[in-house]
Every structure is written in structure tokens, then in C-alpha cells.
Image (tube, coloured by chain):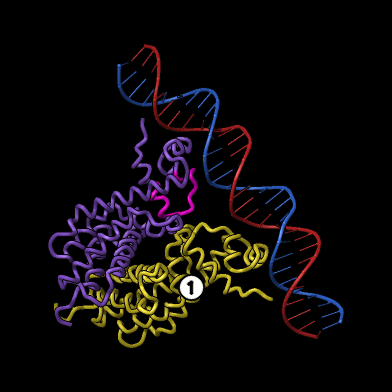
Chain colours: A purple, B yellow, C red, D blue
DNA sequence: CCCGAATGAGACGTAGATGTCTCATTCGGG
DNA sequence: CCCGAATGAGACATCTACGTCTCATTCGGG
């Protein structure tokens, strides 16, 4: 009987990714519950979006943990990270475009995760794996952008789901890795 | 006295990029005109967004023309295209994230421009400039994503405006170009 | 089987945005 | 200088979404 909170959030993310202005009623129906029940679990729209943000932070944090970004070759670590990001790709794509979150100040949790991604690129540069003429900040931003584009391309059917990780990783690393020989 | 329609659209794009849910009143004030005048020029919110879409199509089409994407080395053509995209970057970033447009079906004008970008990548692959294991459709999508990320990074101050074109081009082409030697 | 908790359906008032209208003001051309 | 067009300010009704409430129903555990 009890509603699966994470399932509701997942459905909400799926809908909001396609239609950012979806009403609470549409979200409720997408999740297969009534509007009243949705309100029982999330005080309002703000609370729902905030919960989505928290879920995104949890999932991306988990992906960072699983990818063990501090270990081994930096490029391989990026590949692992992109692969681990797969299940949360839609949610991350939504949050990446959700500029409303930036109004109330960026969540502190995001800054920590952001720093971990940037640290990975910094490590790659120090170890000579990544080129030095692209700033870590830009590589981080590009990482988000390409993950979002990948999720978007899969949703639109322009890229097969099984190719997503490889496409994103190859393009990002191809652009980021140092060339031994030009 | 007469209101500069394109100026209004530019300001609207700037605001909506930061806050997608901005009200008509906020948009009007951002453009420095009254709400009444805004309604005199655009029948409603839908009409305004549609006009933004049209402006984006015009500007991106102009960028494609100026870049002469059918001429010369494909990689250089991509560099020119990214450079020409500069003035419209904010608008394109907004439209890229504006999924609501996809509800009413993608504009026919977009399909034509999309085809020109894809054709550029196809040409690059046929000429041996771009690698063959990344589909043209994905390269096209990644192009949009990176242009959007670039505009976003500049707005956030993470990348200097003067570095934008180089950062985007280097990463995209680094990932897309064929390596003579690994 | 029964009871309680959770849900679904829907009514209701409210707030905010929207679209239209009027009227005073201002700008620019003739 | 004067007239007309365009704008600004604001009133107004309407509409949609929101948040809260009630009540019937259903599900699951004891």
C-alpha cells in the first residue's frame, strides 16, 4: 500500500525532464498516485524539486564512490564514472538544466561532488594523462554537458542506450587526453 | 519610441536562460518595457517562446551561412561554426534546454539546420578527418551540448568569455578527430 | 475476520499569472 | 507647433494551479 517515495521521485524526474512546467497533478498521475497522496509526501512543488535535488546528489555521490575516482589511471576513472552515472543520467540531465535551483544558491552538497569531479581532472593533468590547456573547471562543465547530451540523445532515440557510455566517454576523453603524437 | 523587437527577445532569452519560470511581468521589466507593451508585441507567452525559437533559428542559420560549413577542412569548418555561434550562444543554450518545444513537435526549421550540422560531420568522416566510431547524430548532439555548456560556464564565470570558442572547439574536435598516431 | 492506516476522489478557497481594457503621457514626424 | 501613434500605468475579470480539507474505499496486519 505504502507509496514508494523513490519511485515517485523517479517518475517525477522522468516527466519533468520532458516537461519542466508539468503541474503537480500531471506529476501525480505520472507516478500513478493521486494528487492528494503526492501532497501527503511532499509539502509542495518546492519540496518535491528539493527532494529531486537530494536524490540526484545521493545518486551522483554513489556513482562517484562506486567509480573509485581516486584510484588508477585518471582516464579509466572517468570511464568508470560515466558508466556508474548511467542509472541517474535522466535525473542529472534534468537537474543540469534546472536553473531554478541556482536562484536560492547552489546546494552545498553539489559543491562537494563538483569538487570531486574537478579533482579527478586535476589529478589527470598532474599525472600527464589530460592536456593542460583545458581548465579543470571547463572539463567538469563539459562532463556534465556531455552526460546530459547523452541522456537526451538516448531519450530521443538518436543514440542506442547501450552505446551511451562509450559515446560520452570517447568524446570527452578524446578531447581531454594528451596526445602522445599529433 | 518604437520598441526594438529583437532587443526584447534578447533580454527575454537572457532572463529565461536563468529562470525558465519567469512571469510575463518579469520578462517585460527585464526588457525595460511595460507588460502592456509586451502583450502588444507578443500575443502571449506561447507566442513569445515561439518568437524566441524563430530568432534562434535565424541566428543559428546565419552562423551556419557565415561559417561556410561546406568549404575547406571539416575540422576548420567546425571551428568557424563554433566561433560564429558565439553571439547566439545564450539563446541556443536556452532553446537546447527548453524541452517544451518538443511537445508541439520539433520545428521544421530546426530539422533543416540540424541536417546541415550532421552533414558537416558526415563530410568530415568521409574525408577521413573525423573518426568513424562516433555516429554523426551523436556528434551533432554533443555539439549542441558543448555549446550550451560553454555558454553556461561563461555565464557562471567558470570560463572566460574569450576562451569559450577555443575550449568548446578543442574538446569537441579532440574527441571527434581521427588520431594519426595513438 | 476486523480494525486501522493509507490512499483515491473530489470539493473548496486562495494566490498568482494571464489577457484585455482604459486613460494619461510621451515621443517624433510633419 | 500640433497631431497621431506608441507607450506606461493600472484596473479588471478570468483561469489555472496550488494547498487543504473531507469522506469513502481499499489494503494489510493482527
Q: In the displayed structure, would residue B52 be above or below residue C9?
A: below
Q: Main secondary structure of the magenta part?
A: helix
Q: In the displayed structure, would residue A8 be above or below residue A160?
A: above
Q: Residue furthest bottom?
A: B72
Q: Nearer the viewer, residue A171 or A116?
A: A116
Quarter of the figure with residue A147: bottom left
Taking the spot 35% from the left edge, 72% from the top edge, the residue there is: B159
Do we see residue A90 in this rendering?
no
Q: Residue furthest left?
A: A72
Q: How many marks?
A: 1
Element under label 1? Answer: helix
Do we see residue B109 in this rendering?
yes
| Quarter placement of the C terminus of chain A | bottom left
Q: Is residue B79 magenta?
A: no
| Quarter placement of the N terminus of chain A | top left
Q: In the displayed structure, would residue B159 be above or below residue C20?
A: below
Quarter of the figure with residue A173: bottom left
Q: In the displayed structure, would residue D15 be above or below residue B130?
A: above
* Pointer 1 local density, CA inside 10 Å: few below 14, some 14–19, many at least 20: many
Q: Is residue A25 magenta?
A: yes
Query: In the image, residue A129 lies at what x, y percent?
Result: 16, 71
Tell me which segment is drawn in magenta.
A12-27
Q: Nearer the viewer, residue A41 or B66?
A: A41
Query: In the image, residue A92 lies at what x, y percent?
Result: 34, 56
- From the image, tell me which residue sits under label 1: B57
Residue A39 horizontal side relative to residue B7, left or right:
left
Query: In the image, residue B96 lies at what x, y percent?
Result: 42, 65
Chain letter for the residue marked with disc 1 in the picture? B
Residue B178 horizontal side relative to residue B84, left or right:
left
Query: In the image, residue A46 lies at what x, y percent?
Result: 46, 47
Q: Nearer the viewer, residue A161 or D30?
A: D30
Amino acid at each position: 500500500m505504502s507509496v514508494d517515495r523513490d519511485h515517485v521521485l523517479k517518475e517525477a524526474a522522468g516527466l519533468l525532464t520532458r516537461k519542466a512546467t508539468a503541474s503537480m497533478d500531471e506529476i501525480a498521475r505520472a507516478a500513478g498516485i493521486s494528487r492528494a497522496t503526492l501532497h501527503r509526501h511532499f509539502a509542495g512543488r518546492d519540496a518535491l524539486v528539493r527532494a529531486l535535488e537530494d536524490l540526484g546528489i545521493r545518486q551522483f555521490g554513489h556513482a562517484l564512490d562506486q567509480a573509485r575516482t581516486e584510484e588508477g589511471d585518471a582516464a579509466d576513472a572517468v570511464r568508470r564514472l560515466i558508466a556508474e552515472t548511467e542509472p541517474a543520467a535522466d535525473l542529472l540531465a534534468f537537474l543540469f538544466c534546472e536553473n531554478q535551483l541556482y536562484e536560492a544558491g547552489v546546494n552545498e552538497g553539489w559543491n562537494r561532488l563538483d569538487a570531486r569531479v574537478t579533482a579527478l581532472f586535476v589529478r589527470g593533468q598532474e599525472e600527464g594523462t589530460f592536456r593542460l590547456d583545458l581548465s579543470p573547471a571547463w572539463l567538469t562543465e563539459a562532463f556534465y554537458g556531455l552526460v546530459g547530451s547523452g541522456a537526451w540523445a538516448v531519450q530521443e532515440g538518436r543514440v542506442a542506450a547501450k552505446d551511451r557510455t562509450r559515446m560520452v566517454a570517447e568524446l570527452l576523453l578524446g578531447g581531454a587526453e594528451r596526445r602522445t603524437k599529433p
